Image (spheres, rainbow, N blue to C red):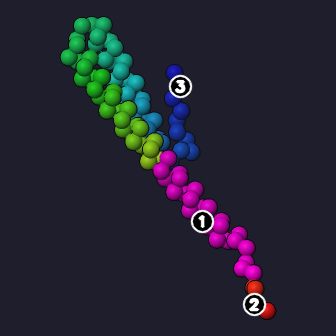
């Protein structure tokens, strides 16, 4: 599996990618532990995988919120500069 290096992404998306890589590793360890009959260790690894996934979701949500606020700020700035001049209705 190829994991993108995150070049050009913001730090929140890079963190999400790191967390997902950690989750993949922990899930594989849990899988192997189940095969070896080490149920307690499998449980621990599964919990840490889930925690890493939750952290990745939080980072992606933060990146989405940041993107939305930047988009709104750009729209507001663009709207302020391209708004038509008011029409003088006094005669």
Q: Nearer the viewer, residue 87 or 42?
A: 87
Which image quarter holds the C terminus?
A: bottom right
The residue range painted magenta reads 64-87
- Location of residue 86 by image quarter: bottom right
Q: Which mark is residue 90?
A: 2
* Residue 68 position in % (x across, y down): 53, 53
Q: Nearer the viewer, mark 2 or mark 3?
A: 2
User: What residue appears at the point 53 percent right and 44 percent down from the top-left corner?
Assistant: 9
User: What residue appears at the point 48 percent right and 47 percent down from the top-left corner?
Assistant: 63
Label 3 vs 1, first from the N-terminus: 3
How busy is the neighbourhood of tag 2: few (under 14 within 10 Å), some, or many (20 plus)?
few
Label 2 vs 3, first from the N-terminus: 3
Residue 12 showing in the rendered view: no
Mark 2–mark 3 distance (CA, rounded to whole Å): 67 Å
Outermost residue toward the left?
40
22 in the magenta segment: no
Q: Is residue 28 above or below residue 54?
A: above
Q: Which mark is residue 13?
A: none
Which residue bears the numbered disc 3? 2
Q: Secondary structure at mark 1?
A: helix
Outermost residue toward the top?
36
Label 2 vs 1, first from the N-terminus: 1
* Residue 89 position in % (x across, y down): 75, 85
Mark 2–mark 1 distance (CA, rounded to whole Å): 29 Å
Mark 3–mark 1 distance (CA, rounded to whole Å): 39 Å
User: Looking at the magenta stretch, what is its main secondary structure?
Assistant: helix
The reply, left or right, for residue 10 in relation to residue 39 is: right
- Location of residue 46 by image quarter: top left
How busy is the neighbourhood of tag 1: few (under 14 within 10 Å), some, or many (20 plus)?
few
User: What residue appears at the point 37 percent right and 23 percent down from the top-left corner?
Assistant: 25
Which residue bears the numbered disc 1? 76
């Amino acid at each position: 599996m190829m994991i993108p290096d995150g070049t050009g992404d913001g730090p929140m998306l890079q963190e999400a990618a790191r967390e997902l890589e950690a989750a993949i590793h922990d899930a594989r360890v849990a899988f192997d532990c189940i095969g070896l009959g080490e149920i307690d260790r499998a449980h621990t690894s599964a919990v840490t995988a889930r925690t890493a996934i939750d952290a990745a979701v939080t980072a992606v949500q933060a990146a989405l919120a940041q993107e939305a606020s930047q988009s709104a700020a750009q729209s507001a700035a663009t709207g302020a500069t391209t708004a038509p001049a008011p029409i003088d209705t006094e005669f």
